[in-house]
Amino acid sequence: MTLTNDLIAFTNAQPNGDARNVMQLSVLDWAACGLAGAAERSFDGFVTANATEGPCQIFGGGTGSPTNVALINGTLSHALDFDDTHFAHIGHPSVAVVSAALVLAQQVDGSIPDVIDAALIGTEASVHVGLWLGRDHYQIGFHQTATAGAFGATIAAARLLKLSDAQIRAALGLTSTMAAGLKSQFGTMGKPLNAGLAARCGVEAALWALSGMTSVDDGLEGPLGFSETHHGQNNPTNLGLGVWQMETVSHKFHACCHGLHAMLEALADVNVETETIQSIHVTTHPRWLTVCNIAQPRTGLECKFSYSQTAAMALSGINTGDIEQYNDDAVKDQSLTLLAQKVAVTGDETLSEMQSKVRIVTDVKDRTVTHDLAAPMPLSVRKEKLLKKANGLVGSEVANALWAAVQGEDLNIFTTLLNAKRAH
């Protein structure tokens, strides 16, 4: 069997119950992040440039064609970099896949359960493609959210469109020649655009395959295919064999790059007078050093990719879960700058990508704190934390309505809520 064959067979798999419960929460999280991203207004020009007539709902108002709305909503839901992450392949699985699934569900008159099921199958596929590609693909500079995400979006779209096996094969081949996205975009508007491009790619590839468009038989593992040309390692995966990766997805409770979260969780219970701090030593997995280690951020967006800045914020009592704190004024705050200059970041291969250790040296004593994001989180706790996060992003009324809609049947109720304006 090849990964392409595994993906085709998995497209119509029966969703796992526990993983599906987590996926419901991820759809809630995706919607809250997208509405908050639209409310920031930074992408207004982008939305206007890409809005077209069509039946699909755009975050914050307006409608458009399936392909364009997948692009827009995928971008807006990743605009704040506050959406879920899976550390198995270092990517954001929901933004591309849910954005693709929702527009095609609207086109085929599907239900919310249809969206949840397709999104789960698609995000699961996305993580497995990322595992198959391996860390070499990520380290060389490719953005897994965009590359692996495009294949996941394609599988979700294929499920909703009820493509035949031959059509799914063609769609995956078409995706292999379109999927793209670079880590060099991190800290810019190009990073969320990567997610939007992946969502659009999945929708286009599936629709084109449905129309009769053909492609190479195996665009992933075949000669000069995606793996060979994109530094893939062809790692074996267990797709469809009972282990569901989405059960261990990580949701963000800090409004910044997920690589910073283990450090921020470690600092959560630290209470120290900042003027007594002499130095701060952060130890993390080396791979994060090229992702979120901007030593001197110049913008609020770059703050989201800075160990030094976010550590200074956390130790200064600033709520790193509040998206409003990541603004251009933060980089001009002299007290934060001085504290950030005391931060040194070191890579340690013995730590996992979900672990961090922080040693704080003060005038009085040293203190070392650690955290592991892989620590199990009960579903009830995850739900409570995500509802609290959604309340902060869109207000309690909209958050509760979104959660009720995600658990219901009527897709129109859910999509109508995407018109909501963020509560200030």
Image (spheres, grey):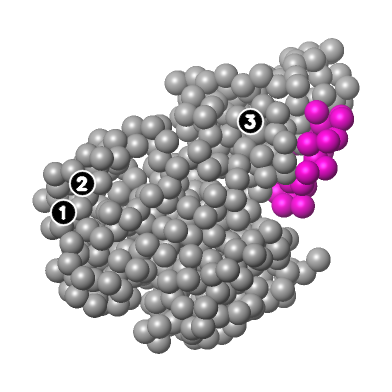
| Amino acid type, label 2 | Gly
Q: Earlier in the sequence, mark 3 or mark 2?
A: 2
Range drawn in magenta: 314-337
Q: Nearer the viewer, residue 19 or 138?
A: 138
Where is residue 58 drawn, in percent x and y?
57, 74
Image coordinates for residue 278, horizontal then vertical, percent:
80, 15
Q: Is residue 173 depicted above or below 64 in this figure?
A: above
Q: Amino acid at mark 1?
A: Asp
The residue pinned by badge 2 equals 225
The C terminus lies in quadrant: bottom right
C-alpha span from label 2 to label 1? 7 Å
- Looking at the image, residue 308 sits to the left or right of residue 375; the answer is right
| Dot 2 or dot 1, earlier in sequence | 1
Q: Residue at x 71, y 61 (%)?
A: 40
Q: Mark 1 = which residue?
A: 218
Residue 70 in percent (x, y) is at 47, 68
Q: Amino acid at mark 3?
A: Ile
Q: Is residue 86 above or below residue 139?
A: below
- Does residue 25 appear in the picture of this structure? no
Magenta includes 163? no
